[in-house]
Amino acid sequence: MFHRRLDEAKNETNEALARFNGVAAFHQPRLGTRGEKAAEASDRYTDSEHELVPANGRAAARVLSTRGLRSRIDRGLVRHSAIQAVIAGDLDYATTGNVATLAALRGMPVRNVMVSSTATDQVVVVRPEIRRVEDLKGKVLGVAGVRSVSDVSLRLLLTKYGLLPDVDVKIVSLGGSGLRLASLQGGKIDGTLLSPPHNKAAVTLGFRELFSMKDLRGVPSGGLATSLRKIQNDPDSITRAIRITLRAIQFIKRNKEETVKLMSKELAIKDKEISSMIYDDGIKLYSDTGTPTDASMLEEIGIAKEFLGISRDVAIAEVADWSFARAALKGLK
């Protein structure tokens, strides 16, 4: 019994590690610690970041190879398309929390149902001679694309420090994290916004972590979003999926050595120092409850309202339903 439960915990940990490090859509049956079948193979996930997760097997293999991942792709999409797929029923969940909030405010039938991280893990990584945000004046920064997460975040940071985006600082669209890191290493840009493991790989190459975005924005990052149709027709499976994720988070927090081994294997990270750095930074962000504070959610809504040009008051219930996370937490042992 003990070994079976340990194997189940490891399987759940693999899934949570994959989502934690920006992996897209994969699905596998899971068994809960009481032996009940949970999160059926039909439960599918997609990536919250702006990197492309391909829709066909050959492209999937290429992207997984470049990102050092072996998880099975079910259906790959990009940000807004992921939300559309959830609404259409092609995906059961998306981990696009911030984008789901935007979609809900646009009137789309989707809601956030869980938060896995209390803040973003993105970091501004720059050339070593740049020591302050103000030193970015006259520099070139790379982002994934126009209005991508990295683009919006960098513009907020520059504005906060009195720099005008596109005037004081040139912003260029380059694509995914791997491409941006390569451009930084090749001298084409002076800085960019990266998440694990790319930011830690950059540090080992001699670049500097200039600013952690969690210190600018206290909004939650990552989690699960689903359609109103699934909320109405299949609520129990939502609770099960959240409970499994919370169990995996518990395992990760309590078992650093085992988690680092699993993470290194899944992400093909050979440098133990990088794996340890990723763990130590990421563990601080994981949510124990699956729900954010009202203040952080209202901050996220405020950013979304500004982005969409909305002036009316917006209640949290318009973009999120935390009842499933609360139910999952009560049943967690």
Image: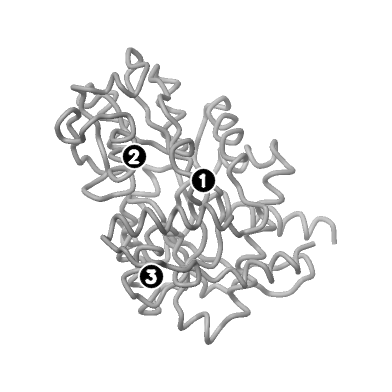
Q: Position of residue 332 (x, y in %)?
A: 75, 64
Q: Position of residue 73 (x, y in %)?
A: 42, 61
Vertical order, 115 against 38 (above or below) = above
The foreground one among 272 and 45 is 45
Whether residue 147 sits left or right of residue 4 in the image: it is: left
**Which residue is disc 2 drawn over?**
177
Asked which quadrant contains residue 152, the reply is: top left
The foreground one among 119 and 266 is 119
Quadrant for the N terminus in the image? bottom right
Which label lies toward us, 1 or 2?
A: 1
- Residue under the image location 76 percent in, 69 percent down: 331
Whether residue 330 sits left or right of residue 131 in the image: it is: right
Q: In the image, what residue type sits under mark 2? A: Ser
Q: Which mark is residue 146?
A: none
Q: In the image, what residue type sits under mark 1? A: Ala
- Residue under the image location 40 percent in, 73 percent down: 86
**Which residue is disc 1 drawn over?**
119
Q: Position of residue 280 (x, y in %)?
A: 61, 33
* Dots 2, 3 in contact, CB < 8 A: no
> Under tag 3, what secondary structure?
helix
Answer with mark 1 or mark 3, whichever residue precedes in sequence. 3
Inter-mark Cα distance, 1 to 2: 19 Å
Residue projecting furthest to the left: 167
Inter-mark Cα distance, 2 to 3: 27 Å
Q: Position of residue 2 (x, y in %)?
A: 84, 57
